[in-house]
Amino acid sequence: MKPKLERLLITGAAGALGAHCRQNVGHLAKILRVSDRLEITREGSATQNDTEEIIQCDLADAAAVQELVKGCDGILHFGGQATESNWKFVRDSNIEGMYNLYEAARQQECKRIFYASSIHAIGYHSPNTVIDDSATIRPDTLYGASKAFGEALARMYFEKFNIETACVRIASCQPEPKNHRMLSTWFSYDDLVRLVTSVFEAPVLGCPIIYGVSNNQRRWADNTAASFLSWSPQDNAELHRNRLDQAMEQPPSTSDDFNFIGGPYVSFGIIPEEDEHQ
Ligand SMILES: NC(=O)c1ccc[n+]([C@@H]2O[C@H](COP(=O)([O-])OP(=O)(O)OC[C@H]3O[C@@H](n4cnc5c(N)ncnc54)[C@H](O)[C@@H]3O)[C@@H](O)[C@H]2O)c1
């Protein structure tokens, strides 16, 4: 099929999910533009030819982000602080960086974005109920609060400027589930690529909240609001249960893992500014 997009920008392309999509979403655009604040080499490219452009860019640099977005008609936005950290790191990448990206999208007339939000925006909810797109924002960390800010910003740019965004609250996107909590939160790499594809191929997107989880037997996420997409997650973490049972003890039912969607993040404190942990 002919690619729908002229040029798809992938931010955070040196990271885990960005590097995976760099290899697997080439069918969506004539040109992939891959970017990170870290250096990216040609070796990780699926094409090894001139259908891929590499641009090193810090999202906190507004002028550089304008240049980065120029000529792009879609953005797969993975770049950012991807776990809890101190306020400076969270602010620079996920608050300033997010604003810079949306301002560039507005000024450069880029109309569709896949935003890698997180379940840590709603981490204080219980996983023992079903959660849909109407769940109240209940961030469990500064990181989670920054992801909620990103969702609000995306919504504002949709209402005002008709920039469409899939706000994807990714749960645990890993090659395979690493612990018992992930029997409910696992999001397989294949299901991620399927979702990215359906977001950029949809005739109309709007600004939906979507839970980035696989078709797990124990999932708590209800994605009815995203049923207009052609996406249908295929993988089920339950197939990994025996391996996990043999490899490790299951935590007690009273642990944060089983009582909060955010799991261990709910008991994190505030990391001081002087701490260089990222
Ligand atoms: N992997 C998951 O399970 C998961 C879960 C929820 C949300 N997410 C979100 O998905 C995205 C990708 O996650 P990941 O697991 O690949 O993380 P990752 O840390 O492997 O990748 C993030 C990339 O963003 C880059 N980056 C950070 N700040 C930047 C800045 N200011 N300018 C430019 N680049 C910057 C980093 O260098 C890194 O390469 C993140 O936004 C993360 O919050 C991931």
Image: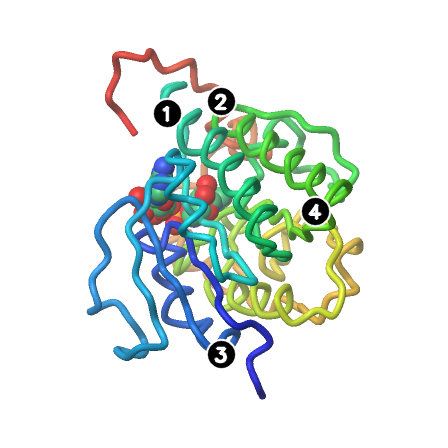
Mark 1 or mark 3: whose residue is earlier in sequence:
3
Could you tell me how far apart the alpha carbons at marks 4 and 2 are, in whole angstroms?
20 Å
Q: Which circle marks residue 225 in the picture? A: none
Could you tell me how far apart the alpha carbons at marks 2 and 3 are, in whole angstroms?
35 Å
What residue is shown at x 41% (from left), y 52% (from top)?
68
Looking at the rendered structure, the kind of residue marked 2 is Leu
Looking at the rendered structure, the kind of residue marked 4 is Ile
* SS under mark 2: helix
x and y percent of residue 227 in the render? 78, 62
Residue 212 shows in this picture: yes
Mark 2 or mark 3, which is nearer to you?
3
Could you tell me how far apart the alpha carbons at marks 4 and 1 are, in whole angstroms?
24 Å
For label 2, the residue is 142
Q: Quadrant of the C terminus?
A: top left
Q: Tag 4: Cα neighbours inside 10 Å, few (<14), some, or many (≥20)? A: many
Q: Quadrant of the N terminus?
A: bottom right
Q: Tag 3: Cα neighbours inside 10 Å, few (<14), some, or many (≥20)? A: some
Closest to the observer: 237 or 88?
88
Closest to the observer: 53 or 121?
53
What residue is shown at x 59% (from left), y 56% (from top)?
110
For label 1, the residue is 85
Mark 3 or mark 4: whose residue is earlier in sequence:
3
Could you tell me how far apart the alpha carbons at marks 1 and 3 are, in whole angstroms?
35 Å
Q: Is residue 1 above or below residue 102?
A: below
x and y percent of residue 37 in the render? 29, 44
**Quadrant of the image occupied by residue 272:** top left
Looking at the rendered structure, the kind of residue marked 3 is His
Q: Which circle marks residue 209 in the picture? A: 4
For label 3, the residue is 27
What residue is shown at x 69% (from left), y 53% (from top)?
164
Figure colour scheme: rainbow
